[in-house]
Image (cartoon, helix red, strand yellow):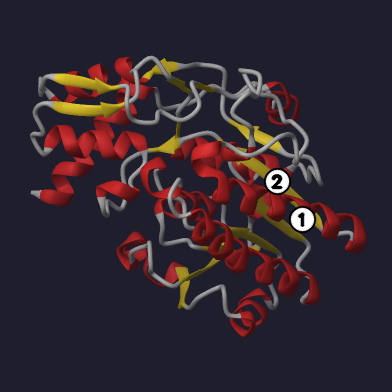
Amino acid sequence: MNEAFWRQSRVLVGGGCGFLGSYLVPELLKLGARVTVVDNLEHGSRTALQEFGDDVEFIEADLRDLAICDAVTRSKDAVINLAARAFGMEYSRSHNGEMLVHNLLCTLGVLDAARRNGVERLMIVSSSCVYPDDAPVPTPELPTFTGMPESVNEGYGWAKRIQELAGNYYAHDFGMKITTVRPFNPYGGKYLWGSEQKAHVIPALVKRILDGEDPLVVWGSGRQRRNFVHARDAVRLMLQVMERDVVAEPINIGFEDEVTIQELVALICDVAERHPKVVFDTRRPEGRFRKAAASGRLKDVVGIYRPEIDLRSGIREMVDWYFRTFR
């Protein structure tokens, strides 16, 4: 990463007390940025910033409030907005309206306030959920409105598509340097466990296995395949893409590697040293059968990047995090 690019840069991180923010903020601080975090703490925790003390300015506020958006974007050089409702498949598929409206409200106001206040750079943090169920795999950066978004995350996917569209318009209309990234399944420790219904696949499985669930019932066939990127690698890639001033062109944050859910469950059980009976319930939805990113455009922008944390090491981190959280 380019330390000179970030040194003394005034960076606003929306939703910086959440999961990805807990990895992004320390990376920005190491690069010498002056970081302000705004978070309503609905899905984040103030403890995510505790170790940084006065090195981070913290504002407890809601980015759905337009007056707040105006106030927090003043005198900023860059905005990275992670504020979102991003839940697991079980919750998202039955709350499409909520996922659409909330995610638009906490993003579009920030975008327009940044424009009014002369913020030069802004990152739209989109999602792999914008891609349709029948997208080719590995999935290249398809145009924003190709087919319908992922069916089990349809409302969330539409919100992210509209955010991308708004970012493209603002880049073209006002000359803003707007970067759009589409992360694929980031995971890691520091996860803020809530209800099991809202949890993402890896933390949900880690918690259920370590809670002693036996038999362990997993939705779908177990043959569905996913690419997972550790959050530390994901945020480092996001920052490198932002440094390059890639405007109005989405970039996947993910790779071609795939693991089946059956293999993932076996790996978690092995690392956790738990061995429940595993039952795959094919009567329940499993989402897209395969999700993996074509990383060609990412490599063109940042060069060859080898993830620092492999899946086994990341699962070990999550298991350790579970014990620090619940014991």
Q: Earlier in the sequence, mark 2 or mark 1?
A: 1
* Secondary element at image label 2: strand
- Local packing at callout 2 (Cα closer than 10 Å; few below 14, some 14-19, many 20+) is many
Which residue is painted at 42% across and 19% down in the image? 224
Q: Position of residue 259 (x, y in %)?
A: 41, 16
Between residues 258 and 105, which one lies in front from this camera angle?
Answer: 105
Q: Is residue 137 above or below residue 98?
A: above
Drawn side of residue 154 relative to residue 251, left or right: left
Q: Position of residue 31 (x, y in %)?
A: 56, 51
Answer yes or no: is residue 83 visible.
Answer: no
Marker disc for residue 258: none
Do residues under tags 2 and 1 come within 8 Å of each other at their CB atoms? Answer: yes
**What amino acid is found at the position of numbered circle 1 in the picture?**
Gly
Q: Quadrant of the N terminus?
A: top right
Between residues 11 and 321, which one lies in front from this camera angle?
Answer: 321
The residue that label 1 is drawn on is 167
Q: Is residue 213 above or below residue 31?
A: above
Q: Is residue 206 above or below residue 192?
A: above
Drawn side of residue 203 relative to residue 208, left or right: right
Which residue is painted at 45% across and 28% down in the image? 228
The image quadrant that residue 51 belongs to is bottom left
The residue that label 2 is drawn on is 180
Q: Position of residue 297 (x, y in %)?
A: 73, 26
Which residue is painted at 67% across and 53% down in the image? 123
Answer yes or no: is residue 278 visible.
Answer: yes
- Local packing at callout 1 (Cα closer than 10 Å; few below 14, some 14-19, many 20+) is many
